[in-house]
Image (spheres, rainbow, N blue to C red):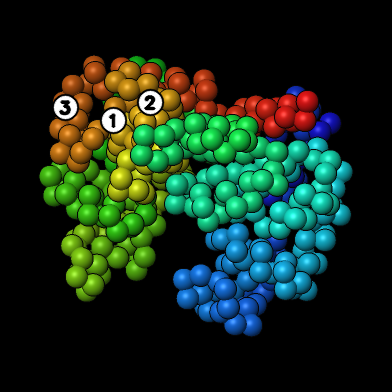
Amino acid sequence: MKKVCYADMGKRTLSDDRGQYTVDTFDPFEYFSPNDRFANAFLLTAGSSGWNKRAALRYSVEGADRLYRERDPSYMRMAGDFIDRFRDYDLIVMPGCNFIHPELLWRELKKPVKILGFIDDPHSTYVRGLPHLWAFDGAFYISPSYIDDMLFSDAFARWGKPAYWFPLTAPQQKPIEADDAFFRNRDMTAVYVGGPYTSKVNRLIKLKRHFGNRFCVYGRWSFRGYSGFIRALFGRPMYPYRVKSLTNEERTNIYWRTKIGFNMHLSDEPFECGNARTYEVPAHGMALISDKRAANGQSKIFESNKEALYYSSLSEAIDMIEHYAAHDDERVAIAKAGFDRFWRDYQYEDNMFKFFDWALSLRK
């Protein structure tokens, strides 16, 4: 039985029917009070005198570096406990921002294979990823695309580290019976579930203006879902609709009723791809309409015009939604192919254990 530390799994659990892995987690933030602040703002970026130590560890490698160099008592106790607990493990995975200083990883944790996750790229590549990559045996990334015309696999080849593409999926509920009626008999046209990021809201305004009630938006928006109205106070275009949040059960039921799932990524430029919606939409039998990204990396996830549809502009997305909402046979063909691809290749636990197998192979 191989022992794995996956240091940011939260409350999710893994059920390894093969009996090959035991997986433990570690929460570094338990060692710091929410109000445990730095003595001053020296060195930390972006005028971060308001940053507490939890935030410093979460958002930048600079936080771990400062806490380690200053021998912060809470940090050193946390790092010491981590090292003692996982010194003899087979694998340590640090998704997101690594909170153990690389000098400690290199000196104190020689036995475990160590893997660093690149999950918010390209925004965080030079903030949370590359500065610590030297102390790791390899990396995983969630976006096949990286930036400009470069795939992430090519970037890691340039950086000289082996890397694994780990799709950003989560456990999904599979319908009991996915017959033709499951894909065809749907009474909602299009849906988007997501947060109110500034540039995304501007796009949602245009979509809602065109489609009206045929395009439904859900998500955890502040001010009880009315934050789209408040934008006007800051000189931004108003989204004049309340956005309702959904429970997991409500989201599943709406997804099962909807023909088309709309997706867009955080970057305005065509950089990263493969956010959670990319997988949620086909998993529930909707036709995925998503944005094209760097080096066409999105087609490595779902094949273009067969398993998903990709647009270059919002006007093209609008035309796609109109066309496939009106042509059921074409829509159902896309939805079925994407659905089959998800349940064949992207189930959460299967992907996690394949990733563990790859990581441990690096020791050989």
Checking the image for residue 323, the label placed there is: 3
Q: Amino acid at mark 1?
A: Tyr
- Which mark, by number, is residue 165? none
Residue reaching furthest to the bottom:
39
Q: Of the two numbered discs 3 and 1 on the same chain, state the one appearing first in sequence.
A: 1
Q: Residue 231: horizontal and vertical position, in percent?
A: 24, 67
**In terms of sequence position, does the residue under pointer 1 or pointer 2 come before the other?**
2
Residue 286 in view here: no
Residue 238 vertical placement versus 164 (above, below): below
Per the image, the residue denoted by label 1 is 310
Give, as a three-letter code, the residue at label 3: His
Q: Nearer the viewer, mark 3 or mark 2?
A: 2
Q: Are marks 1 and 2 in contact (CB under 8 Å)?
A: yes
Give coordinates of residue 353: x percent, y percent.
67, 30
Could you tell me the amino acid type at mark 2?
A: Ser
Mark 3 lies on a secondary structure that is: helix
| Residue 215, quarter of the rendered image | top left
| Front residue (pair 299, 351) | 299
Left or right side of 129 for 149:
left
Vertical side of 301 occupied by 100: above or below: below
